[in-house]
Amino acid sequence: LIFSNKHTEKLNWTREAAIAAENVASTSCSGHGRAYLDGLITENGRPICECNACYTGPDCSVIVPNCAVDADSGNPMFLEPFWKQNAGSSSIMVAGWHRMGYEFEDGSLISKQLENVIHKLHETVGNANTSNKYILFGSGSTQLLNAAVYALSHTTYSSSSSTKVVASAPYYPVYKSQTELLDSKKYKFSGHTSSWRNKTRNDKFIEFVTCPNNPDGRLNKAVLHGKFTRHIYDLAYYWPHYTPIPAPMDEDLMLFTLSKLTGHAGSRFGWAIVKDKAVYDKMVEYVDLNTYGVPRETQLRALKLLNVVVRGDKKEMFRFAHTVMRSRWEKLTEILSTSKRFSMEQLPSQHCAFSKQVRPPSPAFAWLKCEADEDKDCFNVLRAANIIGRKGAVFGVENRYVRLSIVNSRDDFDLLQQRLQDLVSKDRSIVQAVTSL
Amino acid sequence: LIFSNKHTEKLNWTREAAIAAENVASTSCSGHGRAYLDGLITENGRPICECNACYTGPDCSVIVPNCAVDADSGNPMFLEPFWKQNAGSSSIMVAGWHRMGYEFEDGSLISKQLENVIHKLHETVGNANTSNKYILFGSGSTQLLNAAVYALSHTTYSSSSSTKVVASAPYYPVYKSQTELLDSKKYKFSGHTSSWRNKTRNDKFIEFVTCPNNPDGRLNKAVLHGKFTRHIYDLAYYWPHYTPIPAPMDEDLMLFTLSKLTGHAGSRFGWAIVKDKAVYDKMVEYVDLNTYGVPRETQLRALKLLNVVVRGDKKEMFRFAHTVMRSRWEKLTEILSTSKRFSMEQLPSQHCAFSKQVRPPSPAFAWLKCEADEDKDCFNVLRAANIIGRKGAVFGVENRYVRLSIVNSRDDFDLLQQRLQDLVSKDRSIVQAVTSL
């Protein structure tokens, strides 16, 4: 390998990959799509655009008529423009021989540099106290949810052998489906916290506390407080994008994910902050046996991205993210303010220690309720208006509720906004027509 | 993003990352180490070398005296020089905005291009028949082992509800530890196949068949054949590096991993080839709920690496890998041929359909046996000679056996060779001394 001086224009072994990446990136997709290095190519080798939903054509310039807008997935594509604007500082060149071995030099599966920048990140944002706590990585917080259930059910000692796993409805559905997946003798999903309040006695409980809550954006607190109750704080959305940050969390087991922080959901990178050594050790054991750690290229990329997040005044990405989310929430609020048929969650303005000001809400999801008696199936009411949400039943509550994702691409949001506007206007005309009879 | 023509020297947003990568790569570590992009740096910003075991100093030029050689881990670093030689064609530039979303355009978690190159790879090598079969990806074959157990235990119907999971000793220890991890009601690790031969009747069995076997290199075949017996073929080592390939495997459920093919163990990328749709669907369900797929940057990297493997005459990497492994095996065989105290597995020469010739063995591990009555603890016999192996008990057999890894870096192998030579020579001198009394 020939040394490449910082001041020379010549690149050696990185040249081919750099040119390939720039060529793909230069593919024009009309602002409604993008081409990727591993995407399909045309017969003569040109990259094919992957269009946003409801756009089509070779350059994504054609709108699909009467297309149903996808507000189902919480795909955080609203952050993509930030990374396109910061392409120079956020890209990585991964050599073919980069970290081929199973372990890092210290024998661990965790990049020390990445661990350091995560400490710095939380200190900068002030959303979690990481001092004197252990950090481990997972394949998204997805993997860490079950790792935490495994660890807590093996490190909490009471006369009962099985642990009840619970959450407050409406709750993120993976808590239930993942806990039930392997039908363990050690733990069992046991429904809503509300059924167990003041009934915890000698039983072992693990309570998922989601703050802000997915789907309704509330800053949930723990409900159960028995002697053998342990809590998993899922803080995926506890970032200034989605909520004012009143104070740093300082809980025994906290989970975060890159997906909702930088928008890199496809990278499957999450981390746990754990106070107790025994719990941490059990979580490490789980991740070791389950997947033997997080890919080295993912850790390298997370390091690069987080270094962009914490550089300079350390607020650039947060300004971008909050501005988008706040503006989207304001638009939805305005549209629905004139509706009697639909309502959304009401969230308070609060002091945010990160921005040092009182901030209005800016949640990731609209938690819509159909107020009319006959609209018991709110999902279908919206579906008829070409809006795909996620049914209340998925979150453990009635189907009068629907979650609408507002973290998707701008195209998705614009279409959602338009469809909701049409729906509300139509209802209003009907109400006015009826009233004027 | 400004278009960068293939013929101009100017790079735009990829420049910073390319220069950073070339600078790190140019760090001199005396051929006994390397510096990485995410490694530690000195106070004045210079990358710090990460040295091979038993080497130290700022540029890895100092040998650590009396250092114990690590032949424990099956870390496939012997392939690193190949990727350094092919740095230009095997590196990737990952843009900050590369595939941020949860899913690919078709809604799956799997790169179609990568799936295609995997089909092509198996066709080229002739080690597995993939036609009319499904392919899914996992975080190493590690994740897929348990995904397969989950899927087979849920899709095999008999009067018994629990499935017995078994393997032929000596076996890869993760089969046991992973099956036992979550204490499922659906399946239970139930020991060696030898205990169940002709006793399968109406019970449900899942048998791991490892071919070639880890640790002893044998081309294992299925032992149990009950009506409700299913097999998981772990083919991690079924590549021309490690064994002659007599014919393509054509089993219902086959697992492979990038770790042992290209040496990228740190990338945690494996794949399953599955015949039955119901089994495939259950495996997909497992991976979805467990980690929600394999990181996009890992898939992009695997695509790039495999494209190097299948390009040109499609044999370049295999030639390199086989040459190294065969030479190492010959050296070990020669050293141990003069020893009465130690023996190694005897493997036959066989016709290899890939190389179209009869090939001698070239396994990934030496499966050493201490032959002397008093050497019941073979691990400690070797440990006293500064060689760290892996005890037989880990593989479900007596400690008279020890696995020695020979896939590590050249430094590791050279030191292992020297230590074994010393040990065998010493024994011979003692024997000669005793004989001459």
Image: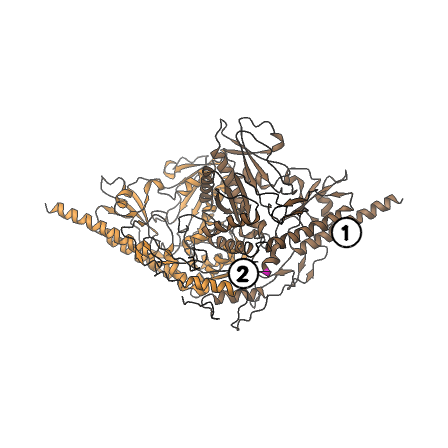
Chain colours: A brown, B orange
**Residue A88 belongs to magenta span:** yes
Q: Position of residue A303 (x, y in %)?
A: 50, 54
Q: Position of residue A367 (x, y in %)?
A: 68, 43
Near-viewer residue (B307 or A110): A110
Residue type of the residue flagged with mark 1? Asp
Does residue B154 lie above or below A70 as drawn?
above
The subunit carrying tag 2 is A
Q: Position of residue B190 (x, y in %)?
A: 41, 36
Q: Residue furthest front?
A: A356
Q: Nearer the viewer, mark 2 or mark 1?
A: 2
Residue A89, labelled with which disc? Answer: 2
Q: Residues within 10 Å of mark 1 (few under 14, many from 20)?
A: some
Q: What SS does tag 2 mark?
A: helix
Magenta residues, start to end: A84-94
Q: What SS does tag 1 mark?
A: helix
Residue B270 shown left or right of residue A380 in the figure? left
Residue B265 shown left or right of residue A23 in the figure? left
Residue B206 shown left or right of residue B423 in the figure? right
**Residue A124 belongs to magenta span:** no
Q: Residues within 10 Å of mark 2 (few under 14, many from 20)?
A: some
